[in-house]
Image (tube, rainbow, N blue to C red):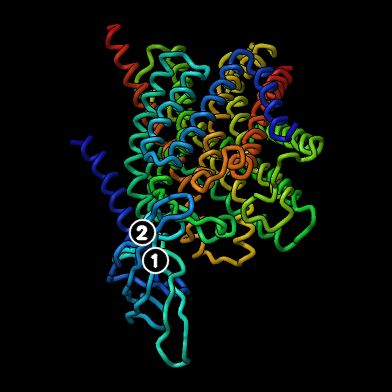
Amino acid sequence: MDKIKKFVFPICLFIGGGLLIFFLARNDAFLYQQPIIRIIKVENSQPQKITDEYGNHDQQVDQKLTGKVLNGKYRGQIFHFKNTFTKSHGEDQQFTTGQDVFVNYYHQHRKSKPTVTIINYKRDAYLFLLIWLLLAALFLVMKLTGIKAIISVAINFVLFLVLVQLDITWNITNFFWIFAAGAILFTAISLLIVIGFNQQSLVTFIAVSSATALALGLSYLVTQLTHDSGMHYEALDFATQQPKQLFLASTLIGLLGTVMDASTDIVSTLFELKQSQPKIAFKQLFLSGRQVGRSIMGPLINVLLLVFFTETFALATLYFRTGNSVGYTFEWTMSLGFVQAIISGIGITLTIPMASLLAAWRLEWMNK
Amino acid sequence: MTTLKTLLLILAILVILVGGKNGFKAIISFGLNFCLLFLSVILIAGGFSPIMVSVLSGCCILAITIYLSDCQETVANTAFFATVIVLALMVIMIIPFDHLVQIEGFSSEDSEEVEAFNLAIGINFESLLIATTILSTLGAIAEAAIAITSGMQEIIEQTPAISSQNLRKSGRTIGFQIMGMTFNTLFFGMFGGNLALFILLDKLRSTFGYYLNSKIFVGETFMVLYSAIAVIGVIGVAIELMVRKVENQQVKQD
């Protein structure tokens, strides 16, 4: 009986919480400045077949939509508007009744009723729902300690946004250094929250900083020596600042995450080992650290490969479908991301001896 | 020699210097996975179902990553089993979520990059997104599964008579550290990878509401959240599998 109670309560809480969050986010239109319309009626035209010069077949459909305004000046009024989508949904989408969309009003005459166009689809309810799912899973597996990891991520995210803001307000030429300074703060905060303020996090901090600096320095040297041959920095998406520095800054932040991952594993294992076998020698400690490092190196490099590669899937498919060669597609959609993944890989390999050496040295020195 | 090739060469040398025999294995699994991923894109572009392609190549990638890593075979089996369970659960979760949230294809911020293309290429971008999501979570799942099963195996070897309750508790302690650090890899990877986008959005003075609703930001966030949920899931499943395995062994010995 007790066991049933123990299960039923969290499940009710989980489903109830999820429903509540979803319900609130579905009805939060009054919090937005931008007008939001709920679609109440949809009429689809006959699909129209289209074929492009590469022989790709697709279908295009026009939609006549009717919706009711949920907020602002025109609240409660009915508007009619249009949408066009292709079956493949490359940059458009098919609307159905019950969905909410952000719109803009256009006034043709001053006093007449405006016409509306769709700006964006309202996605916040699903975003909150997925975050709720993450928290629930975290609580189920880790109980309360799991929340610490999320707090660390949240604080780092806020700090990251502050850095971006600083970068824009200061607008200095060497903006890379803003992010380099930020990287040191990121490391310190993450380690303090996850490990705590002690010798272990100090050793990890030094290992992370030095391995990151070394890996990035080495890679920078290589780009200079090879004169950036084959590096299309101009292919970097959304670049509004000097592309190479932007590339280095973004590489640095990604690199930092992986190096932190690897060195925490190594250093914490060595500290635990020392605790269970206080007489362990320097050399044995170093070798154990290297062993841990060896076992995580392969999987960690594969994580990087998968994350980077899948980012390029949509664009690469588009390139292939429009008659581009394998080499050209690789060079323009994948090579920059690949280089970032390789630099992170170099970071991991450099971390292993450095973290092992530092931790072993510190533990040996503590003995004396 | 191009920058890419030079860096790749340096990575290969370092991996072998640091990893020895394991280094070779790491390079082989990296190479095989790279080829599989490239083949997947080509197959998808050729008109094969993206979800089928990604599930099939996903299973191969998992097997390669786990069995070519430096862990014992019994542990590798448990890790592989746990990842396959979580992969199946993720597919069930991702398909309806991706359909509801409509983050497939390209966003308005991408339009400069894709304006030269006609986007009506007859590929279902929603399935493509599901395929992408499945593959991108795999690496993190596999890494966490290997780490947690190896860690727990270590404990079992040191104290074979450990009670299931204590084993579960130690599993959670190890799991927490693994998770915290995997989160770092994932979230910093996302911040770093989208640095240029964040700067652009900030320059356009985007509101908080924009971040919560825009296709590109929600899309990137969903990728990381899925991976994070998958990592938590695989830690939970792996702990239970290891506990059950030990319980069975202890019963047999009695």
* Disc 2 secondary structure class: strand
CB under 8 Å between discs 2 and 1? no
* Residue at position x 38%, y 39% in the image: B48
Amino acid on which disc 1 is placed = Thr
Residue furthest top as drawn: B253
Sequence-wise first label, 2 or 1 = 2
* Disc 1 secondary structure class: strand
Q: Which residue is mark 2?
A: A49
Side (left or right) of A257 relative to A216: left
Q: Which residue is mark 1?
A: A84
Chain containing mark 2: A
* Residue at position x 64%, y 12% in the image: A280
Residue furthest left as drawn: A1
User: Is residue A213 shown above or below B14?
Assistant: below
Mark 2 closeness class: few <14, some 14–19, many ≥20 residues within 10 Å: few
Side (left or right) of B224 relative to A265: left
The x, y position of residue A145, in whole percent, is 46, 39
Chain containing mark 1: A
In front: mark 2 or mark 1? 2
Front in this rendered view, residue B37 or A8: B37
Q: Are marks 2 and 1 on the same chain?
A: yes
Amino acid on which disc 2 is placed = Lys
Q: Is residue B9 visible?
A: yes
User: Is residue B141 shown above or below A329?
Assistant: above
